[in-house]
């Protein structure tokens, strides 16, 4: 955790990785303990597990020393055609077999579970890899969308032999920016006033590649923990007794910012909408009313970057600098997209302005 001062207000930032697989997934050989140890070494504040059709991490976590890290068990659901991947939290049990997406999205919502649409769109240049896309859009029952997924983008980069070599040798270079299609879909829901949050996932599996007697771990968990993170911004310190619930609530409400740490550390970054005297303010996932008086949007970065401000899905500002501010006159949602060089760096969740 680190503290951030925005004007006179102290904010507590908890840095975490979501969408992590362990040996409870058929396609990962890594134990829950090894995942937790890797996350501690990197200094993460929280991690969330999402094994395929399994909440197996939950029992393992009871027997592991999780003193310095908050661990949240969840699972990843899919339908019989292996599409419609869904990251699920806050449920007693996991489905142990594939069923149609409509059923699990509705049932999980009914039982107060929390669900995020995983890697909604994928671009596969090679026929060797299939797509696992979301196609059940006729619903509003989900809580958020995984707008950036490391593994999905890495797999998208595979096309010809030279690119395969490059993708294995320098995997982070494949991490360009979230797919515009995913961001547009996210905005589409928020334009309807549905307040869907965004998260960024690593989708770590730690699979091994064997060539003769050589074995190489592709995308080890520890490496991915230094890439796409979802950082939670809290007005108060997390309470020990219910830190898991608080993190899940923050992810659901979008009190978070998605950051690619392979690009740079975002420590000094902030964005928020403030009243004239800066006494009242709203950060990502929060709401502020125009009736408060004059409002200004502020964002600050440690260095010059390409800053885009999105209002109700439209890019209203696109500038290369380290800070900007402007008067907020219109209701709706405001978020920022920040590129450092040509690579995506920071994607904030929306701030909601009401009449
Ligand atoms: Zn998936
Ligand atoms: Zn996954």
Image: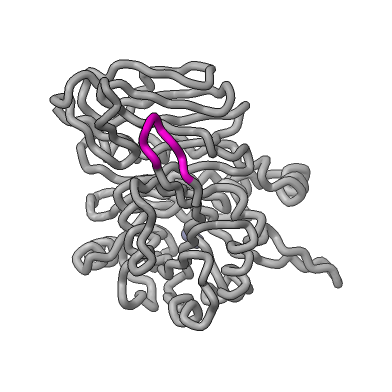
Which image quarter: residue 35?
bottom right
Q: Residue at the location (55% across, 47% down)?
A: 228
Q: Does residue 167 appear in this view?
A: yes
Q: Quadrant of residue 125?
A: top right
Residue at image location 16% in from the left, 26% down from the top: 292
Q: Is residue 185 visible?
A: no
Q: Nearer the viewer, residue 234 or 335?
A: 234
Q: Is residue 142 magenta?
A: no
Query: In the displayed structure, would residue 245 be above or below residue 133?
Result: below
Magenta-colored span:
3-10
Where residue 117 sits in the image (x, y, percent)? 37, 53
Quick one: 323 or 147, which is closer to the camera?
323
Q: Is the magenta region chiefly helix, strand or loop? A: strand
> Would you say 129 lies left or right of 139 here?
right
Asked if the magenta segment contains residue 4, the reply would be yes
**Rendering coords of residue 39 (x, y %):** 59, 62
Relative to 339, is 279 on the left or the right?
A: left
Q: Position of residue 67 (x, y in %)?
A: 51, 71
| Residue nearer the viewer, 156 or 53 | 53
- Number of on-image labels: 0
Q: Residue at x 36, y 26 (%)?
A: 310
């Amino acid at each position: 955790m680190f503290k951030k001062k925005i004007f006179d207000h102290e904010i507590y930032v908890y840095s975490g990785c979501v969408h992590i697989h362990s040996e409870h997934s058929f396609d990962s050989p890594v134990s829950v303990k090894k995942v937790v140890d890797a996350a501690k070494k990197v200094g993460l504040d929280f991690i969330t597990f999402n094994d395929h059709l399994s909440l197996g991490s939950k029992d393992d976590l009871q027997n592991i020393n999780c003193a310095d890290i908050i661990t949240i068990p969840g699972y990843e659901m899919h339908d019989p055609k292996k599409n419609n991947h869904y990251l699920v939290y806050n449920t007693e049990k996991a489905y142990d077999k594939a069923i149609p997406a409509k059923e699990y999205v509705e049932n999980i919502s009914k039982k107060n579970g929390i669900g995020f649409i995983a890697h909604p769109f994928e671009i596969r240049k090679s026929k060797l890899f299939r797509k696992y896309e979301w196609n059940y859009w006729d619903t509003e029952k989900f809580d958020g969308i995984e707008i950036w997924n490391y593994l999905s983008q890495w797999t998208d980069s595979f096309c010809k032999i030279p690119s395969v070599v490059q993708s294995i040798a320098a995997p982070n270079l494949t991490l360009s920016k979230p797919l515009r299609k995913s961001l547009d879909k996210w905005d589409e829901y928020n334009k309807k006033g549905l307040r869907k949050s965004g998260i960024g996932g690593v989708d770590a599996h730690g699979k091994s590649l064997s060539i003769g007697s050589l074995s190489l771990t592709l995308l080890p968990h520890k490496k991915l923990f230094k890439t796409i993170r979802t950082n939670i911004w809290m007005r108060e310190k997390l309470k020990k007794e219910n830190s898991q619930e608080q993190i899940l609530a923050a992810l659901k409400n979008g009190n978070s910012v998605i950051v690619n740490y392979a690009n740079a550390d975002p420590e000094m970054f902030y964005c928020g909408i403030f009243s004239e005297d800066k006494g009242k303010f709203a950060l990502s996932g929060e709401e502020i009313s125009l009736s408060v008086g004059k409002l200004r949007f502020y964002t600050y970065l440690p260095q010059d970057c390409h800053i885009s401000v999105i209002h109700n899905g439209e890019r209203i500002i696109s500038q290369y600098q380290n800070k900007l501010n402007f008067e907020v006159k219109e209701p709706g949602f405001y978020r920022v997209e920040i590129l450092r060089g040509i690579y995506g760096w920071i994607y904030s969740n929306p701030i909601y302005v009401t009449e």
